[in-house]
Amino acid sequence: MQLVYLHGFATNPQVWHNQKVDYAPEINFENMDAESQKLADQLNRGSILVGWSMGGMLALKMAAIAEGNIRALVLVSTTPKFIKSPDFPYGLPLALLRRLEKRVRIEGTAAFHNLVFKNRRSIGLAHLSWEEVGKEFNQLAQIDLRGLLSKVSIPTLIIHGDRDEICLPSAAEYMKENISGSELVMLPGVGHAPMVEVPELFNSQLDRFIEKYA
């Protein structure tokens, strides 16, 4: 069994420093299709994927490609569709994403880090170029993984904070309803980065799930 941890936007594998990590690749989110295929090809049989935010989106895509090699799936503070639409009210408005992109382009990725980590001192922060920010935000604007949810047949744990303002808690509830047999753990008072905000609580839920399916 291999525990594979997938980081999110503007971070790197060190964001998982509070967890027991077997493998945590450096991820490029500029082309989610190509990246998910590349990482799926590297998986050991029996892997457990733990994906946070955009890394959770990538984990969903990898599960669709290489489910035979994946024993279980953990989706942390993620969503199948970042942008709100008439048939998906659980996302954020496109205008808000574009405002955030503009702010990040002006202030740098520290603006995003402050939004996510609430000025907590953290490691695992990555600083992207303007070009990288534009490409990755365009992926967020376009991606829609709702069609994959009903196809997930492996054990799935969804961990989400009820104060998450980036990937809304209602998106986690939507995934719970559409991934058969999945489990949702909603953490009270927690925002977008539970592995940093409440590492002991996060790890206890993760360990419980892993022990069940290891």
Image: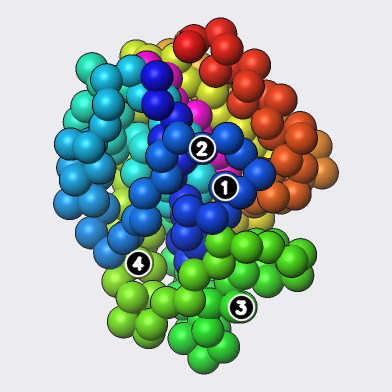
Task: Specify few, some or many for label 2: CA neighbours under 10 Å numbering under 14, 14-19, or 20 or more.
Answer: some
Q: CA distance from mark 1 to mark 4?
A: 21 Å
State the residue position of label 4. Answer: 136
Vertical relation: 44 (above or below) 212: below
Instruction: Give the foreground label among 2 and 3.
Output: 2
Residue at x-position 51% and y-position 45%: 52
Task: Specify few, some or many for label 4: CA neighbours under 10 Å numbering under 14, 14-19, or 20 or more.
Answer: many
Q: CA distance from mark 4 to mark 2?
A: 25 Å
**In terms of sequence position, does the residue under pointer 2 or pointer 3 come before the other?**
2
**In terms of sequence position, does the residue under pointer 4 or pointer 3 come before the other?**
3
Q: Secondary structure at mark 4?
A: helix
- Asked if residue 125 lies left or right of residue 162, the reply is left
State the residue position of label 2. Answer: 21
**In terms of sequence position, does the residue under pointer 1 or pointer 2 come before the other?**
1
User: Residue 158: where, in percent of width, then height?
Assistant: 56, 29
Instruction: Give the foreground label among 4 and 2.
Output: 2
Residue at x-position 17% and y-position 51%: 34
- Residue range of the region highlighted in magenta in the rendering: 71-80
State the residue position of label 1. Answer: 16
Q: Are marks 1 and 2 in contact (CB under 8 Å)?
A: yes
Q: CA distance from mark 4 to mark 3?
A: 16 Å
